[in-house]
Amino acid sequence: MASREGLAAMRDEEKALVALCCSVSMSAHRSPSSPFLLRTVSHPFPAAVFAFPASWSVDDWILAGDRGGPFGESEIDASLFPSLRSIGNDEAARVNGAFLRSFQRLLKDSRLQVEVHRALAEKKRIVFTGHSSGGSVSVLAAIWLLEQFFKSDNKDQVFPFCVTFGSPLVGDRVFSHALRREDWSCCFFHFVRAVDIIPRSLLAPLSSFEQEFQAILHFLCPKSLCFGLNTIGEHLVIFFYSTVLSNALSISCHRACLAMGCTNPLLEVIPGFVKLSPYRPFGTYIFCSDNGLVSLKNPDAILQVLFYSFRLTSKEGLTEVAYRCLEEHLLYEPKIKECLAMQDVVSMDGLEVIPPCLNDGISDEMQSIETMLEDLQLSLEARLCLRAAGEWENQRLRNQAKIDANHGKVQEALSSLSNYRATCEIRGLGYYDSFKLQKDKEDFDANVRRLELAGLWDEIVEMLRRYELPDNFERRTDWVDLGTSYRCLVEPLDIANYYRHAKNEDTGPYMVKGRPKRYKYTQRWLEQAHRMPPWSSMESCFWAVVEELCIDSSSNKPFEEMKEKVLELEKEASMWLSSGKLGKDVLLEESTFVKWWKTLPMQHKLESCISRFMNGEDMLGR
């Protein structure tokens, strides 16, 4: 359950580095003309610390006009961040568009890339840091560097370290999911004062009150001549606090209901009527209270703490709390030093067993934990939400265990189909054509295996669609390899069944309307795992293209109109036959492919890139 691990295990030298990051982040505010500050340190390890200043202009927080909607989000730049997507669902992450634009400009117009690569060449660990929106830019910088490591596949590289202070949220659920899937979340540490409003600010639709928010930013700017309620007015302070709080309540309640397993269908349609913030936490959040630090990694739990520790209590008036939520944003440097010096650092990972209330006779450790929870104003309701978040994470692990239990069953069925394929080849007819004809008992048995496997894989796909499996499931090598074997062996049978029953006449071509999600998902797993371009592993769909070309030929479509598709198929077939991704049964005399290819014009066949295969020159020696 909750423990004193995590940050508590951080060495004094590492705590000193965090304190340095905070100090440099604040110094960056005093150098607005510089896109970043660079500090090099030799202790506790050689490092280059890049600190990004915050912007106090609303244009750098919210995209102008309707480009980002009420919450200012936009689709991630896939050229810079190709990993920030849901693999199977093929859904790109969405991030705050203004923060993304700031980073793109920084990358293009500053010496950031040059300085980072110089530090790497000098074997220094890279540390990105920032306060307020500077922290959001530092997050994107760290992910950008992680993407560079991913491309280079350099196993010796030490991952960058990113520390933010009072940073607003950056990306949506897919953003958080992708970072956890790639095991990059461990690189990010977000320090948040218990009632600082800025880390919660993007839970509200800032675009609906841009002018008011600009006044708030002017109020927060460290260079403001005066810091007091009279500079912006009590009404605006209360309005900002109340707006953020009410929106935080909406998203907190919605996520809590989902985590608790509420099956009311209204939950699915609420976002269609009430626009909820798309932004979600990621990485490790360290909440700073008056008595120490509390760290959390569970995104749903973090979201709940962001709301419940921010609520108005009966002990303070609305105006007082609203003002303090702004003032707290400027107090990180002294408060972080105080907190790092304390011994009370609690890491809450076992959320499902957090005590709802204080019991008599508990240990001193639990007494300390209870004190920290009370400091964060985590009521009974809040603790139940945290327990639900932890239980949901455990449910995802149980779902994975259930899927893993079917691993052997899938392998057994694939082995049976491999034997079926070999039997068909001995009989002189490829397994695609044999299955399509369905003349023998072996063909019937193969169809039963196909249907059994479809059920198992459809269950996996549905769980992934609803994010009911651990985030790293699609990255697991055992399932990527098994999914590839399944797709390459079984999808041709699905194609054969599709055209055997003439489903194309009602539904359309297999590749357009008929291809099941289970094959699309497993294909994307492979392409992501091996850094392949999208749709570059289509060998399992070979027969679908052949079938459509056969239909074109039988309807007397002129060859010139088909030629481009024929040439593309032949090019891919040559590559797949050479690499062994297509078996030699494709070239058997009675193969549908061979029969169709022989109907092509003679001149084309003589010049074809696969003529050597059709004449048996390359396949016989394999």
Image (cartoon, grey):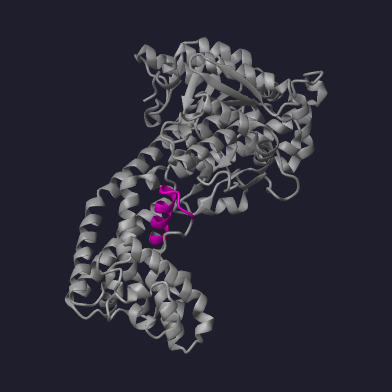
Magenta stretch, main secondary structure class = helix
Label total for image:
0
Q: Does the segment drawn in magenta span residue 39?
A: no
Range of residues picked out in magenta: 519-533
Instruction: Using the rendered view, name the quadrant where residue 167 is placed.
Output: top right
Q: Nearer the viewer, residue 148 or 458?
A: 148
Left or right, residue 459 beside residue 323: left
Q: Nearer the viewer, residue 113 or 163?
A: 113
Which quarter of the figure is the C terminus placed in?
Answer: bottom left
Instruction: Using the rendered view, name the quadrant where residue 109 is placed.
Output: top right
Q: Nearer the viewer, residue 61 or 569?
A: 569
Q: Residue at x 61, y 34 (%)?
A: 113
Q: Is residue 261 above or below residue 498?
A: above
Q: Is residue 249 above or below residue 493?
A: above
Left or right, residue 237 beside residue 15: right
Asked whether the viewer can see residue 618, the reply is yes
Q: Does the segment drawn in magenta span residue 528?
A: yes
Which quarter of the figure is the N terminus placed in?
Answer: top left
Q: Is residue 316 above or below residue 452?
A: above
Instruction: Using the rendered view, name the quadrant where residue 170 is placed.
Output: top right
Q: Residue at x 62, y 52 (%)?
A: 273
Residue 116 image position (x, y, % from top left):
58, 30
Q: Residue at x 47, y 28 (%)?
A: 296
Residue 100 image position (x, y, % from top left):
64, 41
Q: Nearer the viewer, residue 190 or 440?
A: 440
